[in-house]
Image: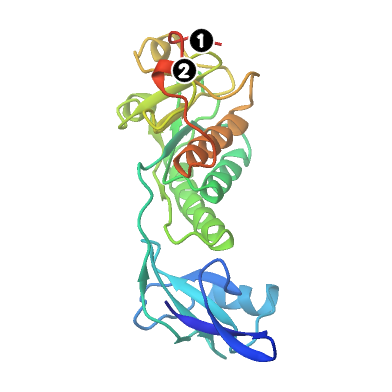
Amino acid sequence: MPHDVARASGGAAVAEPVTPVSASAHVFVDDLAEPRLVDGDHRHLGRVLRLRPGAAVTAGDGEGRWRSCRLGAGPELEVAGEVVADERPDPPITIAFAVVKGDRPELVVQKLTEVGVDRIVPFVAERSVVRWDAAKVERQSVRFADIARQAAMQCRRTFLPRVDALSDFRAVAELPGAGLAERTGVPPSLSVPTLLIGPEGGWGLAEKASRLPSVRIGAHTLRSETAAITAGALLVAIRSRLVGECVPSQVEGPHAP
């Protein structure tokens, strides 16, 4: 493991491994062999985080590979450790959410990235109020990718989530392991690792007739953005074994309370 930080222990300096969690900052670069900060990240580390040359940082490629580095005077990073490859979490967790008004879709992408969701799919549902034209779809795709990247650096993720372009219900209903988030249904589990979150007006008749399993994520009626973030957090917590998973035998029927 890479070593870069010396800490005092009984008067002696003891080197400890530098990881994305323990480093002063975590960044993404295009080339781990010759890591170089993009302009925005270089300014952020110096002006916002106020890091100085020599600070311990980690650089990743967004695919689970990372290495420890030291911040230089310019955008080039000084390599300080070997490349480490993290194991990708399994199963992959996907949240597809119907786009809503304002900047709430951006909040959803940010928070789903922070909690550890692997794939994020915005889509238009039957009762969606929001309808984006082609130019808006392109702008939002770029914006979502940037939000996910910044959020992944902030929370020290080594895997960048996949953020799809705007889709429709038919496409998201065919995602592997898909289920509908509903007020009634089975508890969340890894047997349904993809949850579809409806719009403010709820699911349409055709969507309810899709034969996808219904999964309940709370006892109350949640706003669309709250439901998406809650669903992602629950599934990641189950996968991380932070909470227990309810197996089918523990549930009495598909609409048990």
Q: On residue 186, which mark appears? A: 2
Q: Amino acid at mark 1?
A: Ala
Along the line of sight, the residue nearer the viewer: 99 or 50: 50
23 lies above or below 217: below
Q: On residue 256, which mark appears? A: 1
Contact between labelled residues 2 and 1, with CB atoms less than 8 Å apart? yes
Q: Quadrant of the N terminus?
A: bottom left
Residue at screen point 54% across, 89% down: 72
Q: Is residue 168 left or right of 24 when viewed as pictured?
A: left
Q: Which quarter of the figure has residue 129?
A: top right
Colouring? rainbow
At which x and y percent is residue 173?
34, 25
At which x and y percent is residue 85?
35, 66
Q: Dot 1, how many residues are within 10 Å of its Cα: few (below 14), some (14-19), or many (20+)?
A: few
255 lies above or below 70: above
At which x and y percent is residue 256?
51, 10
Q: Amino acid at mark 2?
A: Val
Along the line of sight, the residue nearer the viewer: 6 or 83: 6
Please count the marks in the image: 2
11 lies above or below 237: below
Q: Quadrant of the C terminus?
A: top right
At which x and y percent is residue 54?
58, 89
Q: Is residue 37 left or right of 65 when viewed as pictured?
A: right
Say what secondary structure mark 2 lies in. loop
Residue at screen point 34% across, 13% down: 211
The numbered mark, 1 or 2, whose residue comes first in the sequence reads 2
Q: CA distance from mark 1 to mark 2?
A: 7 Å
Q: Dot 2, how many residues are within 10 Å of its Cα: few (below 14), some (14-19), or many (20+)?
A: many
